[in-house]
Image (tube, rainbow, N blue to C red):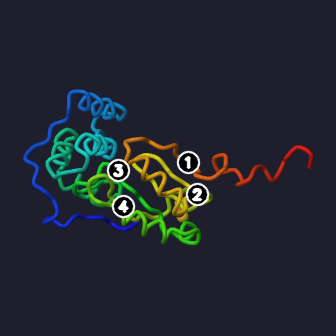
Amino acid sequence: MAMVTADPKDVPQVASFAFTAENEASARALMAKYPAGRQASAVIAVLDLAQRQQGWLPRVAMDEVARLLDMAPIRVYEIATFYTMFQLKPKGRHLLQVCTTTPCWLRGSDDIMKACRAAADGTVFSVQEVECLGACVNAPVVQIDDDFYEDLDAASLGRVLDAFRRGERPKAGPQIDRQTSAPAGGPTTLATGD
Ligand code: FES
């Protein structure tokens, strides 16, 4: 997976970051899952909490995570810059993570990526190319925020994006007549009457 870093000139300066009382309580609950002295094990979950609060991860948020977990800030930066789920510069309201690995590519991810890039205005949508999302059987796949949209083509992707633009949250999963990852068109094995 490619390391994603942000060019400092694209990153606005944020003066300070503090967890809300509710998120600080959630962070402490995450830390409490680990033995005393091992609270750094919660770093990814606590970074995720900071990102959900702020919308992205400014350096001051990483510093606050480091303080809370009693870690050297550089260790938190190393983690935040390694994993592509951490956004190191502001993004649109919805993040389109387009899978372009081989199964999705064979099933049309070039067109999907083109349409997502065209939709990415930085306000409603931002786009990011990602490696396999682990839902290859329903390729091509785009992760939008926390949900997978699968079996996409240009028309169904357009409908999904339009729904997000209207402030709706369209039904996630396959965008064709398929139950989860079962065969398209219905069962092909253990079907009654065979
Ligand atoms: S290749 Fe796209 S989900 Fe696996």
Q: Amino acid at mark 4?
A: Ala
Drawn side of residue 186 relative to residue 123, left or right: right
Point out which mark residue 94 bears.
Answer: 3
Q: Of helix, strand and loop, which one carries label 2?
A: loop
**Looking at the figure, which quarter contains the N terminus?**
bottom left
Drawn side of residue 11 relative to residue 186, left or right: left
Residue occupying the point 85% across, 47% down: 191
The residue indicated by pointer 1 is 173
Question: Is the C-beta of the residue carrying label 3 under 8 Å from the nearest atom of ligand 1?
Answer: no
Badge 4: residue crowd in 10 Å (few <14, some 14–19, many ≥20): some
Mark 3 and mark 1 residues within 8 Å of each other at the beta carbon: no
Q: Quadrant of residue 68?
A: top left
Q: Nearer the viewer, mark 4 or mark 3?
A: 4
Badge 2: residue crowd in 10 Å (few <14, some 14–19, many ≥20): many
Q: Give the spatial CA distance, label 1 vs label 2.
A: 8 Å
Q: Quadrant of residue 166?
A: top left
Q: Give the spatial CA distance, label 2 vs label 3.
A: 20 Å
Point out which mark residue 119 bears.
Answer: 4
Residue occupying the point 20% across, 31% down: 20
Q: Is residue 124 above or below residue 127?
A: above
Measured as percent of width and height from the top left, residue 35 is found at 34, 34
Q: Of helix, strand and loop, which one carries label 3?
A: strand
Q: Quadrant of ligand 1?
A: bottom right
Point out which mark residue 151 bears.
Answer: 2
Q: Give the spatial CA distance, label 3 vs label 1.
A: 17 Å
Q: Give the spatial CA distance, label 2 vs label 4.
A: 19 Å
Q: Nearer the viewer, mark 4 or mark 1?
A: 4
